[in-house]
Amino acid sequence: MSEMSARSNTRLEPEESWTVVTESPLKGLAFAREAGRILAWDEGNQLYLLNVHGEMTSSTRSPNRVLAGTISDDGSLVAILCDNDDAGLLILSGDLEIQAERAAPGEASFVATDPFGRYVAVGSRLGAVQLVNRHGRAAGRIETIQPIAHLCFVPDRPFVVGAAAFGMLAGVDLEASRTPGRLEPEVAWQDRLMSNVGRLTCSGDGSMILASCFTHGVQRFGLDGRNAGSYHLGGTVSHAVPDFPGRTIAAATIEGELAIMNSAGNVRWRTRLDRPVIALEIDPLGRFAIHGRATGEITRLDFFGPPAGREAAKPARASATAPAPAGGAARGRGGTGSVRNPDWAVQAVQTEDQAETVVSIVCDDPPCIAVFSSPNRLELYGTDGRKLGAGPETTGVGRILRTAPGWLAAATDRQVALCDLRRGESRRVDLRLVELTHLAIKPDSFGLAIVQERDRIGRATPAGRWVWKHELPSAIEDVAIGVEGFAAATTNDGRLLVFDPAGEITPSGGFDAADPPFLIEAPEGSPPGLAWITLARRAQELKGHDLRGGVAWSRRLPFEAWSLARLGPFAVIASADGRALAFDGAGDVRYEGAPGGGANDVYALDPEGRPLRIARKDVHVLCAGLDGRVRWRAVAPQPVGPCAAGRAGVAVMFGTKLAWFSSSSAR
């Protein structure tokens, strides 16, 4: 009796062999069964190629957002589907070297390849499946009644099985055409399938076709399309994968269960994971499974545990971007790679409702964290987690935090509290305010620039005395303080207003009233005379202005930017889909960020003065450069809340706790 036959009759005792952690949240993986290679891709568009021992053999970064990927069973070809109109399909070698680029069909949804890497199939939500050869040349089309959403090649014959998202299963013969390098697909059968399909897989000879149908369990079909029954795990099945002979099936549910079954449907082992798997593959001989979770872990699970007489080894855990040590699987500390735990976390508020409305800010001079929560409670923390004190109580609604070197201001719609961070003193500013909407501070040189009811602007001293006040005919969009006692504001009727130290107004136009511009003070180190920068969002125009509002330079933007922030020596603009540009004061682009973030991303400088982007996605917090390379990420044990960042680090709410990630620890 062979070793495999003997093992099939023994009780399963699965053991985790190794775990590799990707630098960004995992999006998907594919398995080259014959070559023993694992292709994985993450939210940062990083591609990884691992062997079955968890060692990284190659990695690269996709130039565009990765939608799907596949690798041939022999490991000779990798195909990547990207979010790009001109080069949506990338065909790579087994070492991730680009071999061909071509446009993908509109609304492309999946990519698959045959076991020997000769042909690639690209599906679309709009219609037929396009077939191309390994050189990227058109090789045929598969046309069915409904658009195919899932497709798998049968390894031992020229045949594919496809399924629509709902209502159809089809088998297609791939006949060779008289024209070299082309195929003439012919639909052999189509059958109705009265459920949604999450995944479609098959055994080596196609005699076992498994459709993961969520609440309808795993539906089994033969190569002729006839339903051969179903398997039910008691959960919502999202993945079911057979080994090559069809004797062993690995299955996973949305609820987080992972199970191993035999071909009769008997569950031989099951467990519940802390988070559900988003990708699942099985060894062709049924010896182990590989699963990936959105948190970034790729894990190999050996079904039969260690060989008889050998004690189980501690599972290896490593970063997918770290080189593997010689002579064995990659090993590392429990939290290695780009995944970090907070340097510290303290209870900042009492309830989840308070946590959702927290406003926080990181001060750079001196380094500290301010948390402003309801009911109008301001608390300061050092970068070591110690509580430094609390600000004075304020009345009113709303919460605004502003910083200047050595100072912090916290405001509601009716009161402003000012904290001298260097002296450790705080007080309420003695002003009677009504519906404060904008605030800028420079207590050492200017004082406070305050806007009430969006149309009344004034300059006040830190002691609470008005220097000047104006009521404007239109609402204010943005306000900033410059040098030499000057301030500026942009208005909803498309004007830039500059106020001299005595409050005299110098107006300038040039903006569309339907597109009121954003405004910031010129970045540090700007050319002499440059005082302000404005952003016209819909017009896609960034302008630099002199002290009196005259245009010094203008730059056309490649996208509609929906935010403008002053970040040390940079003016950073960002779009809703995460594209970002960092300009210096001369109007030159210094850093460029690809899509991948979101409208609520937070920007900061690292200790070397390079821009960082901090994004929150579900349970993840990701800190990356504008080039998309992840510096570190964290997996939150509780809901992720408001976030703030500075040179010293990143502060983020995990539930009701304030968590701190120090820049020095990241280095």
Image: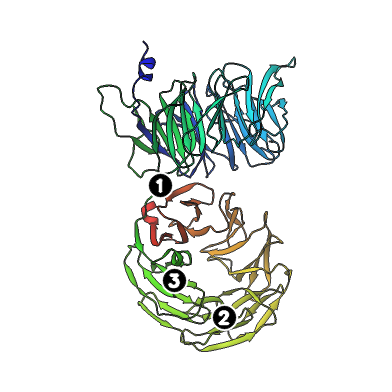
Q: Is residue 331 visible?
A: yes
Horizontal and vertical percent position of residue 384: 32, 62
Query: Element under label 3?
Result: strand
Q: Nearer the viewer, residue 341 or 123?
A: 123
Q: Along the horizontal axis of the image, is 185 left or right of 54?
A: right
Q: Dot 3: within a 10 Å radius of its alpha carbon, few (fewer than 14), some, or many (20 or more) residues? A: many
Residue indicated by mark 1: 339
Q: Dot 2: within a 10 Å radius of its alpha carbon, few (fewer than 14), some, or many (20 or more) residues? A: some
Q: Is residue 30 visible?
A: no
Mark number displayed over residue 435:
2
First of labels 2, 3 by sequence position:
3
Q: Marks 1/2: CA distance?
A: 43 Å
Horizontal and vertical percent position of residue 594: 59, 49
Residue indicated by mark 3: 372
Q: Marks 1/3: CA distance?
A: 28 Å
Scheme by which the image is coloured: rainbow
